[in-house]
Each structure stands twice: as C-alpha cells, then as structure tokens.
Amino acid sequence: MTTIKDVAKLADVSVATVSRVLNNNGYVNEDTKKKVVEAMEELKYKPNSVARSLFKKESNTVGLIVPDIMNPFFPELARVVEDIMNDHGYTIILCNSDENPEKEAHYLDVLKRKYVDGVLIVTNTLERRHIADWELPLVGLDRPLGDIAPSVYSDNFQGACEAVTYLTELGCRHIAHIRGPHQITNAQQRFAGYKQMMEEVGAYREELVADGDYHWEAAEKAATSLLKEHPYVDGIFAGNDVMAFGVMKAAAKAGRSIPEDLQVIGFDGILLSEMMSPGLTTMTQPMYNMGKKASELLFELIRGSDSTSDPEPFRAKLLERNSTRNKS
Ligand code: RIB
C-alpha cells in the first residue's frame, strides 16, 4: 500500500510538506503543492483516515447514540442525521444504548477514542457524572438533557393535548391512554397532556390509563385488558405509533371495529403507520427538521460555538388517516 513517504520521495519533498498539503494547513508554495498532488495521483495514494484523525485529532465523523433501532422511529431519525452529516462531509457511527446509562457511557468513551468530532444522543439516563471528563461537542435529540447539553425535541405536551382534543371533537367520550415508559421524559409529557385535557372536561379516570413500554407487544396486552374491563372505551390515544399498532391488534381480537366503534390515534408519524389497515391517524413528529436542527447545532458547537440553550421545541402535527372518523 502506498504511504505518505512514497509520495514525499516521488515529489522530492519532506513528509511534513506532504502532510501540510493533505491537511491544507501551513504554507506550501503552488509549485510544490502541484508536485505533491501529481505524485499522489500517479501513486493512487489515499490518505489513511485513521492517521489523519490521530494527527488532526478530528475525523469528520460524529457519533449517534439511540436507544434501539428496532423501534422504527430511530432508523428514520438516524437516516435524516446521516444524510445531513454526509452533505457536510461527515460520516456517522451509530450506537444502540438500550436506554442503559452504562452502555451510553461506554459508547461515549469508545467514540471519544475514535476521535469523533461530536456526538448526538437520544437519552433519558445520561447524568453529568457519566461525562465528567467529556470535552467534545454533545447535542441531545428527541429528549431534553437539562443543563448537560442543548437538545432538540418535539412539544410532546402540546401534541398530546391536540390528540385528545381531536378525539373529543370526533365524539369520543371515554378516551383511554396507553402511556410510554414512566422514566422517559416525552412519555411523561404525553401522559400529562392527556391527563390535563381529560381533567378539563371532567372525564379523567385513572383506570383508563395503562402502562406501555413503547413496544407493540406490551401495548397489545394492556389494550386487551383495558377493552375487556372497560368495553365502553370509544377512543384510545397511544403514546407512540408502535404501541398504537398493538392497540389495533387488541381491538381486532376483541371484535372492535376501527374507527366505527373505537377510534385510535398514535404519536410519531413513522412510515409504517401509513401501511396499517386502516392507516393510523397520528401526531407526527417533524423528524427531518429535528434531525436537521440537531445536526446544525452540533456543527455550530464543533466550530466553537458555546450555545447551551435548547431551540424552541417543534410542534407535533395531526395526520388524519382512517383509524379515526375524520372531521374533514
Ligand atoms: O417510538 C419511540 C418513541 O421514543 C418515540 O415517540 C420517540 O419520541 C422516542 O422518544
């Protein structure tokens, strides 16, 4: 394999001169630069990216840590981030943390040792002690990071309020909620929005709230029990689309027809929600704008900005399909 020394020998310059041309730093006169470039082309030399990283202490890569790409929300978000990073000449290293703080800390250490230029992280468990000696740019995505780092996310409370208002306006009078994990901020905010809207119309009943875990299996079990114990339920707001799929499965097994006698709305707007039958009405999160904003914020930090505040949360938007009896 051709090395930087071979290029220097052919161009009759020092290795340091070739390195300056490679990294575009320090003065090299045009004639010398031309000789070095011609030597690289003749030898088909490709700079060793690991060596460049070691030398420059940067690698044009960023880390992206998400809980679990088995949940279809995260691959869609990761794809947006990767496309935007590629547009800026960066590649990403994708890590699954399983919402486990030890795994998050491990991945942050691995990414630092790979000289990534920054990290985007979806986390609800990262604490300052996990990043005690962390110096690299860090931006949160999908969930707030408090005073640890700026973060980009949706207005989950607003989206939940809008989902419940929508079901109420469609005539639902007994609306249940399958909530996400108690420890996850956006699940708490979606539950809070549901609770407030139900209390405002004097219809909040604790027994109509069932625990889910953001996966469809637990949501199907929760919805099966809920529909059996409370057959009068005529609307269900699921804390994310994947749990709404579980609700729809439970409703079918219980002989309920959607949307005729049970209306269902989800949260996220993942592509799969379109493929359901009937298609799932949902509160869409603006994944492209979230990924774009988080990536731009990270680039600003990489370029030396000291921004610490969260941008304005993005509004979740209603996407009507046939799991509800639409107004329009
Ligand atoms: O579906 C996965 C959920 O976890 C989404 O609602 C997203 O907000 C993430 O936090």
Image (cartoon, helix red, strand yellow):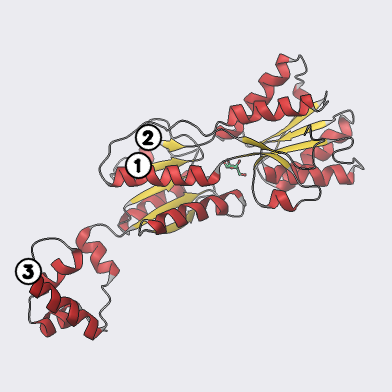
Question: Disc 2 residue type?
Answer: Ile
Is label 3 in a helix, a strand or a loop? loop
Residue 163 is situated, as x and y percent measured from the top left of the image, at: 69, 30
Question: Is 273 rendered above or below residue 175?
Answer: below
Camera-nearest label, 3 or 1: 3
Residue 72 is situated, as x and y percent measured from the top left of the image, at: 62, 52
Residue bearing mark 2? 148
Question: Disc 3 residue type?
Answer: Asn
Question: Disc 1 residue type?
Answer: Ile
Marking on residue 94: none
Residue 24 is situated, as x and y percent measured from the top left of the image, at: 17, 63
Marking on residue 131: 1
CB-based contact (under 8 Å), mark 1 and mark 2: yes
Question: Is 199 rendered above or below residue 48?
Answer: above
Quadrant hosting ligand 1: top right
Q: Nearer the viewer, residue 291 or 191?
A: 291
CB-based contact (under 8 Å), mark 2 and mark 3: no
CB-based contact (under 8 Å), mark 3 and mark 1: no
**Residue at x 16% of width, y 83% of height:** 6
Residue 70 is situated, as x and y percent measured from the top left of the image, at: 61, 55
Q: Judge left or right: residue 44 versus residue 143.
A: left
Camera-nearest label, 1 or 2: 2
**Residue at x 79% of width, y 35% of height:** 326
Is label 2 in a helix, a strand or a loop? loop
Marking on residue 29: 3
Using the rendered view, name the quadrant where residue 32 is placed.
Answer: bottom left
Q: Rounded to the nearest whole Å, what is the CA distance between mark 2 and mark 3?
A: 45 Å
The residue furthest right is 255
